[in-house]
Amino acid sequence: MIPNPWDVGSAVMLQSLGFKALASTSAGMAWTFGLPDNGVARDDVLAHLAALVEAVDVPVNADYENAFADDPEGVAVSVGLAAGTGIAGLSIEDSTGDRDSPLYDFSLAVERVAAARAAIDASGGGVLLTARSEGFIAGRPDLDETIRRLRAFADAGADCLYAPGIREDTQITAVVQAVAPKPVNVLTMGMPVDALAALGVRRISVGGSLARAAYGEFLRAAREIADEGRFTSFTRAAPSKELNGFFAGRKPDTSELS
């Protein structure tokens, strides 16, 4: 189980709760910048990743979107830069961001994974490469094509395979079996850990869901104030003493505050 913090504070809290690894969330991070998902520049993402790695003692996986490049050469450059932040793993997507053509052509998608693999190997850091096929969240929910891509990504050097958006038992089982013995990450849509483990899933993440849960409570409280002039939502707030306890002993790092 690798939950997804959206900033240094949430990363420190999750480590304190006993999680053994964490993963960044592109959406959660973007919202802290006041931007939509996929709206943050690469340099800002790299700084964010470095800050997360510095803040915690557990491995951090990077949600690295499409590696901020279309061509394999650009992917290799971006992946090399990410490896230099100290991350333990990263994921790259086959999503283009183009609504009319949301996935990279099959051959190009595979070449991009191979380029990421080569860049990681050249870095010598042992970063774990997760290859994502985005069809189920990009308007192309074709299980056969998703499996074709994941198998090819595995052959191109991906260590872990990931198809966000699959949620049915039969879909998950088909993906797990198709790429075995390589592990599969699942973005949980509410299915509990034991149920996913029983399907053969080896890694579970939550994407932007923790950030959305936090922002959801914030908006409920703020709207109650704006619309009703009431403050009853504050009764569910975490105590200051508990929050301060997570961060006791930490010293300010100006890079985290920028």
Image (cartoon, grey):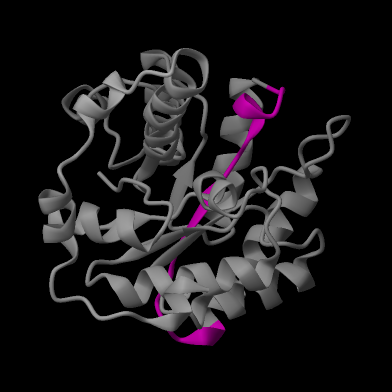
**With respect to residue 119, does 154 lie above or below?**
above
Write down the quadrant of residue 254 in the picture.
bottom left
> Does the magenta segment cover residue 202?
no
How many badges with numbers are in the image?
0
**With respect to residue 205, does 129 lie above or below?**
below
Determine the residue positioned at 51% across, 33% down: 164
> Does the magenta segment cover residue 125?
yes
The residue nearer to you, when weighing 99 against 26, is 26
Q: How far across and how far down the image is residue 211, in percent?
A: 42, 40
Q: How far across and how far down the image is residue 155, in percent?
A: 55, 54
**Residue 177: in sight, yes or no?**
no
Determine the residue positioned at 55% across, 43% down: 151
**Residue 101: in sight, yes or no?**
yes
**With respect to residue 115, does 108 lie above or below?**
above
Q: How far across and how far down the image is residue 195, in percent?
A: 21, 22
Q: How far across and how far down the image is residue 134, in percent?
A: 62, 36
Task: Describe residue 248's horizontal placement relative to residue 251 as left or right.
Answer: left
The residue nearer to you, when weighing 58 against 126, is 58
Write down the quadrant of residue 237 in the picture.
top left
Task: Describe residue 147's horizontal placement relative to residue 228 as left or right.
Answer: right
Find the magenta span and give its range: 122-140
Determine the residue positioned at 53% across, 74% down: 258
